[in-house]
Amino acid sequence: MATKIVEPEAGPRSKRAAILAAAVDHFGEAGFEATKWSTVAERVGIGQTALYHYFESKTHCLLTIMRLELQRSHDKFTEATADVTDPVEALRAAVRAAYDVSDQEVLQMRILQNHMDLLSGPRKSKREEAERVAARQLVQVVERDWTNLLVRGMSQGAFPLRDAQLLGASVLGLIVSVWRWYRPSGPTPLSEISELIEGACVRMVAT
Amino acid sequence: MATKIVEPEAGPRSKRAAILAAAVDHFGEAGFEATKWSTVAERVGIGQTALYHYFESKTHCLLTIMRLELQRSHDKFTEATADVTDPVEALRAAVRAAYDVSDQEVLQMRILQNHMDLLSGPRKSKREEAERVAARQLVQVVERDWTNLLVRGMSQGAFPLRDAQLLGASVLGLIVSVWRWYRPSGPTPLSEISELIEGACVRMVAT
DNA sequence: TAACTGAATTGAACTTGGCTCAGGTTGATC
DNA sequence: GATCAACCTGAGCCAAGTTCAATTCAGTTA
């Protein structure tokens, strides 16, 4: 069922990584629709048709970026909360981890948020659909990460009992909503955002 | 500066409202990109070129939907909080108002959320750009609605002092994040969501 | 060194869907 | 029943994503 996507091993001449990087830059800054696929090719230094050696379509590339970001988010969450036993501290660690990101990763989160709706409907082509399903699964995994954290806290009596599923989705929604408007060049540093949201989440869940 | 968009008064034969309704249905259910502009025309019962009598482009129609929804949200907020003096009660009323919506309005909120990024960059054509600027202004108005509510509560001592701008954006982000996943046909009734979020917002702000 | 192989690349042509244009129809008003 | 603006249409244009057959390149085999 859980068909894991096998990451194509990079031949020494492969431009796959370069394409992904260029795509993240352009999709993140200008937006997916506003970015011409051929522009990405230019940036990498290849003809536009060469892109199809690596990705089945522009959308396939987008879905790949989204899946990779979801995988990263999940890994980061797991790593950050692994050896924290106190529920409140685990929650705080998870929030801090969510905002401990590079500028490139900010773009990836923005892309992910802006195209979540792509994950609902099925795709025509095989490889696109594979990426979509994998991403959809990872969304559920991440949601479970947060729900489990809350369930643990509730059963330990650290958090009042509430609908953990719904509250988890809300906490997650609150956290990721930042990526819609945050800009590294903007007036508010990410550290400040991180602190405010951390406090907000704790009050939301633990009060 | 604040160039208000003059709503074209409906001639008796005008299909503008019907087009908007059909567009909301399709853009909301299938997604904007996935919806063929000609499909909307079919649904309304006119040829696709007739659409251009009412909207300059498919995107112009989308931006109009977004602006109208923002206007509605702002009006609803104002109406709901107008004669509530107690800050906590005003906050509660505002949240409840945000979720007091019809199925059609759920779709409109979904469309709005899914295409917020359109509002950042400028548009080529005149009327599109006018709608974009109007929508962008309304976003700021709505943000101010929430920020002001918090400022009032803080200065009255009902809410602890925090960065009202940032906290307002967060509360708003939390509330609207629901429209990404909520489906009227889904397992969770909106009333339940409304109650949980209402409590969460109060704890977040007033604790 | 010549032949071979698969990955990487390309130019040219195809497809789709949004959009333009030049003109035609309808109906309210005088 | 002439006029005018609102409303509508068929034919075709164009941009951008995509396909395809053919080619180059780098490493391997003989």
Image (tube, coloured by chain):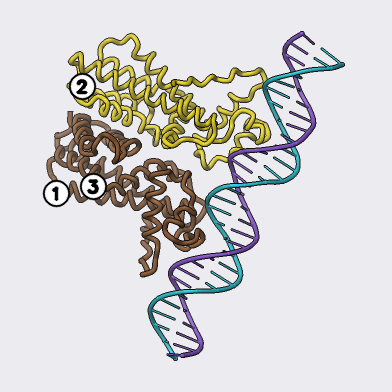
Chain colours: A brown, B yellow, C purple, D cyan
Q: Alpha-carbon neighbours of circle 2 within 10 Å: few (<14), some, or many (≥20)?
A: some
Q: Quick check: do tags 1 and 3 share a chain?
A: yes
Residue A21: percent from left, percent from top: 36, 54
Residue A77: image tag: 3
Residue A99: percent from left, percent from top: 24, 42
Instruction: Pick the quarter of the image with the C terminus of chain B.
Output: top left
Give, as a three-letter code, the residue at label 1. Answer: Asp
Q: Alpha-carbon neighbours of circle 3 within 10 Å: few (<14), some, or many (≥20)?
A: many
Nearer the observer: mark 1 or 2; the answer is 2
Residue B182: percent from left, percent from top: 40, 33
Image quadrant of residue B55?
Answer: top right
**Side (left or right) of C4 relative to A85:** right
Nearer the observer: mark 1 or 3; the answer is 3
Q: Say if B144 sits above or below B129 in the image.
A: above
Residue that appears at 32% across and 27% down: B172
What's the CA distance linking mark 1 and mark 3? 11 Å
**Side (left or right) of B32 relative to B143:** right
Numbered disc 1: what chain? A
Instruction: Pick the quarter of the image with the N terminus of chain B.
Output: top left
Residue A48: percent from left, percent from top: 50, 58
Observer able to see residue B180: yes
What's the CA distance linking mark 2 and mark 3? 28 Å
From the viewer's side, name the closer residue of A46 and A95: A46
In the rendered image, which residue does mark 1 sit on? A83
Residue that appears at 40% across and 32% down: B179
Tally of marks: 3
- For numbered disc 2, what is the local secondary structure? helix
